[in-house]
Amino acid sequence: MSCWETLMDYGLRSVGIGERLLPRDNFTLCQQVTLIGSGMIWNIYFGTLALISGFFLATAVAVGKASNLRVIRKASEWFIFLFRGSPLFIQFFFAYFLFLSLKGVSPIFDPLSAAWLGALIVLFLNTAAYSGEIFYGALLSIPKGDLEAADAYGLSGWSKFRRITWPTMLRLAWPAYTNEAIFLFHATTLVFFSGFPAWRQKGDALYYANYFADKTFNPFVPYPILAGFFIVLTLMLVALFGLANRRLNRHLPKDRQSKMRLRMNLIR
Amino acid sequence: MACYLTTGKHMSIYWSVGTVLLLLAITAPTALLFGFGGAAAARSRIAPLRWVGQAYIAVVRGVPDIAFFLFFVIALDQAFEWVRHQVKCPDWEDPIRQGSDFIVCGIAKLPQGNAPQWVHETYGFFLAVLTFAIVFGAFAANVLFGAMRAVPRAQIETAEAYGMTQRQAFWRILVPQMWVYALPGLSNLWMVLIKATPLLFLLGVEDIVYWARELGGSKTARFTDYPHPDWRMWYFLALLVFYLLFTRVSEIALGRLMKRLTQGQATLGGEAQRKAA
């Protein structure tokens, strides 16, 4: 079987298009690259949607944590502590079993116990908590002069927030937020190892890499392939966030623009 | 209820909490050692050693960590067996990789097939510790590398002016002073390490996640003697609370440690403490 045929058969296997059966023996390098690459679709799906939806909740949480109202502040603080203080792995497990028991209550909750929605919700809440903390830190370090200037121009309330506070907060938080985004994509690999079943073997990249490693008992091929895919993904993310960073900093003189510094990635 | 929570199987979940704590207690110093080695290598003046150190730090970035965990457990196991195979059976003819099998001669197997159960478990645990230490060692190396660079240059220059050798300046001046710069990074790392412990489950160690799944489940054949419905949700809620408490306690303890270490240092924090006193 030529590599092109393999690509046609397994290129979209992770979303259920193409050959139903996974290869069982005589794995070729092409099969491994194709299937693991196909699994990346799920990683990108989880990462992108969680990042975009989490961004809005994170802004709300950050503003909430800086709020003067005690109730809102405490609620935001607890939300952040809950999701940052416990392992994502346990959160996945807990959420999965919670959704399972909800399923018994009413069939409305059925899709929650499937990975595409349930895991997405967990990732959304998790990234909202982590980036909320980042945004909160940035919110506190907005230069006082900027806010005073906004007052002097007669801006207040929503228009002050939209035009001054929020863009400045994003600008200050952006390098840290880039790291958070990279993290999030790495964290998506946990989904199918934490209770959420890979229905009809439609799994993510690590799921397939693990499948090959189990079948061939040779970790030295599938995991480096996976690593290669993730390095490419990380580089693309960095480039994309770098563009946004340029735009956020475009009004500043060249020497004051905050450089993107990449820091190490850790498990959450 | 009290009776239910103290059954034999529940005792194993409490034991597995001990396993987690033991893992933390062993891994933290080992990872620190790996990290120290990595950082010292990365700033070495010998180029190949420097490359090794920098590559070690760089490779662990950019790749999902559980991929590393899954990779290292098999890779280390095979590496050990391969080395033993080379040493113990030099006249073995067949190739080691036959299709999808990894075959070494009988006496090179680790652990031996006839070894008792606890040897297997300890070996698995040992592999897990080594894996954790390698991965977290790279993170620690990164932190310590930064801390070594943060020590004011003037301190090293003064040491050189006193006629200390490179080695003396490193051990007597740089190493004692770098800890206060490294502590914020290291305490962050400790939090992350705590939160990484449930991944033990993926490495095949029977840890708390394993037992929570087993005990909470209703249909597992081995535990039919608990006629309760699916309680796994509550078991995982308990785990969640356990981890929350653990991180909170560590946070407070590390805050105190930081306060002690800042004492008398030429940093902003140390200066603030001096003024307050």
Image: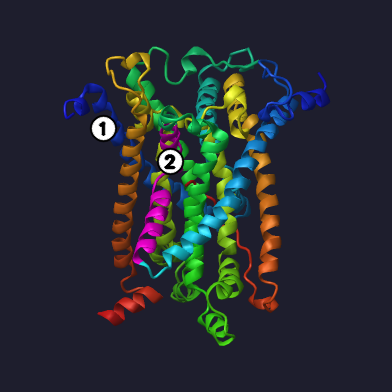
Name the kind of residue labelled 1 in the image.
Tyr
Task: Mark 1 and mark 2 in contact? Answer it, CB < 8 Å.
Answer: no
Query: Between B72 and B152, which is closer to the camera in this rendering?
Result: B72
Q: Mark 1 falls on what kind of element?
A: helix
Mark 2 sits on what residue? A91
- B256 lies left or right of B49: left
Q: Quadrant of the N terminus of chain A?
A: top right
Tell us which disc is closer to us: 1 or 2: 2
- Residue A26 in percent (x, y) is at 70, 16
Residue located at (49% from left, 46% from top)? A267
The residue singled out by tag 1 in the image is B14
Determine the main secondary structure of the stretch shown in magenta.
helix
Q: Would you place residue A67 above or below residue B32 in this image?
A: below
Q: Is residue A163 above or below residue B103?
A: below
Distance from Cα at disc 1 to Cα at disc 2: 20 Å
The scheme the figure's colours follow is rainbow
Q: Residue at x 45, y 43 (%)?
A: A88
Q: Position of residue B199 (x, y in %)?
A: 44, 36
Q: Is residue B53 above or below residue A143?
A: above
Magenta residues, start to end: A70-99
